[in-house]
Amino acid sequence: MENLLIIIAGIAVILAVAYAIFNYFSVKKLEEGTEKMGEIAGAIRIGANAFIRYEYKLVAIIGSVIAVVVLVVISWQAACAFVLGAVMSALAGWVGMKIATYANVRVTNKARETKDLGKTLKVAFKGGSVMGLCVAGFALLGIVIVYLVFGLAAGQIEHIAKDIVEKNFIGLETSFTMTLSGYALGCSIIAMFNRVGGGIYTKAADMGADLVGKTEVHIPEDDPRNPATIADNVGDNVGDVAGLGSDLLESYVGAILSAVILAGELFMNLLEFENVEFLKTLLLFPIVFAGCGLLACIIGISYIVLKPRLSKNVHMELNIATWISAGVTVGVGCLLSWLMFKDFKGVADETFKLDGIKFVAGEFSPWLASVCGIVAGIVIGIISEYYTSYDYKPTKKISHSSKEGSALTITQGLATGMISCMLPVVVLAAAIFGAYAIAGLYGISCAAFGMLSFVAATVSVDTYGPISDNAGGIAEMSELGEDVRGITDKLDSVGNTTAAIGKGFAIGSAAFAALSLMTSYLFAFAKIDVIEELVLNLMKPLTLCGALCGGALPFFFSGMLIEAVAKAARKMVDEVRRQFHDIPGILEGTAKPDYKTCIEISSQGALKEMRVPCIFCILFPLVTGFIFGPEFVGGVLIGATISAIMLAIFCGNSGGAWDNAKKYIEAGGVEGEKKGTPAHDASVVGDTVGDPLKDTVGPSLDILIKIMSTISLVAVVLFGQFNLFGLFM
């Protein structure tokens, strides 16, 4: 049975990667269009390739240092898994960026040739599906390798079941859960640098292009006369595509491994008798469930890729693909849960204390808990759509507020973002409570991987957005007709909403995963022979101080990111103004702007400014742990998780609403207003304020809480024993 289940996960990986390769080359073989379109797409491709090469060189140096540290203080198995995770995450980002730079111009050309929204959507989605399939395929491939090589071949799963204590080079205890944590940490490190670096790059270019081009000289978005427009389009690929790929892969891995790690910790610490087969089932279920979800996504993606003719209702078509993926996942997951747990009826209730694993619905308990996550993800997505789409009242109110100026545009957007936090959090709380009631702590981790079990479909939908955005930029710079730009603008507008939905999935799964990792963290430093110590008491001053500092941490981290974007954007604004002043022929169309300098400003600004925030989030739990000890860090994790969830939802929804409020005006939704009017200028300002929130800060916060949880889990074996505060208490 075990071999059969592993084969299912392996088949899912092979089919996903093969399907991604097929879609990659089927997109690439399409025509690029006119010579000018090919020239512009080539410039975007060169800029994106150059940036990601420089970024990966920097990340490789930092990653090598971390790998050596993991090797010394954790284990060689964890170090190998760390490198594997980093490679998988980096590969997903690179492949996604590569296909986006090929698909963008082909989407433009399909719109130019056919004037058909459905056919153009198919090309954009097919390009996005390459990223979606690779994210899930590479992530699951790495997990299967770690499970087979270290869990089975190296015997680390047997060690857990037989309570055999492994030692590392310096005599500290290590285990399979630490190996898994190493893999998750590798994914998280790459995701953080890709998201932060790419986010700074894209928003610096975007803000520079908008503030000068749109509001000062009143030229259209992506006008070829704007010196920052190529850099802006490069940013879509390195930030919204490469960063997105690494980000969602990290979320996917974190969700799956939080369940596997928790199961291992529960067995090592709360097991009353040996049951190796039950342990293996608990460890394997999240992996195979993810494999079944990936197979379901292949079916959902094929709905759009293979359907002969798509309708003009873009959002409906994308939703159907997602619903098919989710529905098949739920159905197959039910069968899988019954098949894997039917022989263990009552075992969970008899063998574990503290409701760690308590299956109230028998063999269907893990499935029902995962359904809680799936339903929560869909509902959060619907809520995000309501607050960010210009089809609904909140975003329309922002558009109409723009008639009163920039101040009220920003004020209304802030109000919308803050109000939008309440319902998603209520949904998360209900899902957490439901999952816990059904299957205990293990159920919460099941909800985490359930929410992201069809990540290949959600990432495909999400990635299609920046591809469409780039396609619109190429259409504008190539001076194609309004009919072409109308098609790409429609796709881009829907893409803004799907991006907000994808971010909702990421932060929701982060909440579930962080809670599971928190439990594993408590196991790692608690004295298990005194069960009551498996409680983090917030009434203790040290823990409360940690929670307060943790609550402030996401705001401090976000402030650093916004400041980093502002610094880079300021240089971009100065450069665009300089070129308009020193080269007067640009606005008349008789002189060509210097695109290269703007690309260099974004690249240098991103590479310089991303270092401090990224290194800070890595070092903070370590430094505070070695000073104040594990209880303080536990408080930090609780405070940071709660604060980051709220802040991430606010940033994603407010930024998406501001962006679509601008597009609503451009589409003629506000009577008497259009591009170039004072109301449109005010909406551009609102969009500019929201840019770093939705594309830099929001996506980075879910990585922040997971990377801090993972680092704390890995390092607690050290600072739990050796901390400065413990010497004096």
Image: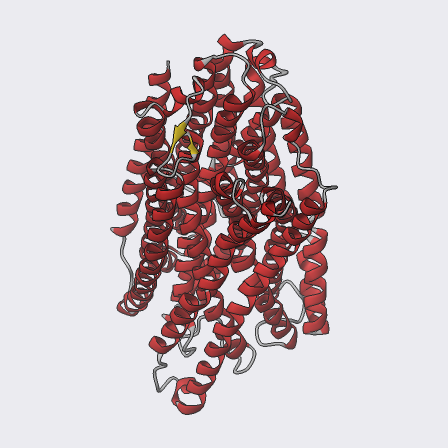
Across and down, in percent, residue 213 comes to 50, 78
- Vertical order, 507 against 465 (above or below): above
Across and down, in percent, residue 654 comes to 63, 58
- Vertical order, 545 against 48 (above or below): above
Q: Tell me if residue 497 can be seen.
A: no
The mark tally for this picture is 0
User: Which residue appears farthest toward the right when viewing the image?
Assistant: 539
Q: Is residue 423 left or right of residue 282?
A: right
Across and down, in percent, residue 704 comes to 53, 50
Q: Tell me if residue 36 can be seen.
A: yes
Task: Determine the image quadrant of residue 363.
Answer: top right
Which one is nearer the viewer's eye here, 665 or 545?
A: 545
- Vertical order, 157 against 169 (above or below): above
User: Which residue appears farthest toward the front when viewing the image?
Assistant: 728
- Vertical order, 590 against 51 (above or below): below
Across and down, in percent, residue 683 comes to 62, 69
- The quarter of the picture where the N terminus appears is top left
Which one is nearer the viewer's eye here, 337 or 707?
A: 707
- The quarter of the picture where the C terminus appears is top right
Snapshot colouring: secondary structure
Residue plotted at (60% across, 55% down) = 554
Q: Is residue 492 left or right of residue 187?
A: right
Residue plotted at (60% across, 27% down) = 441
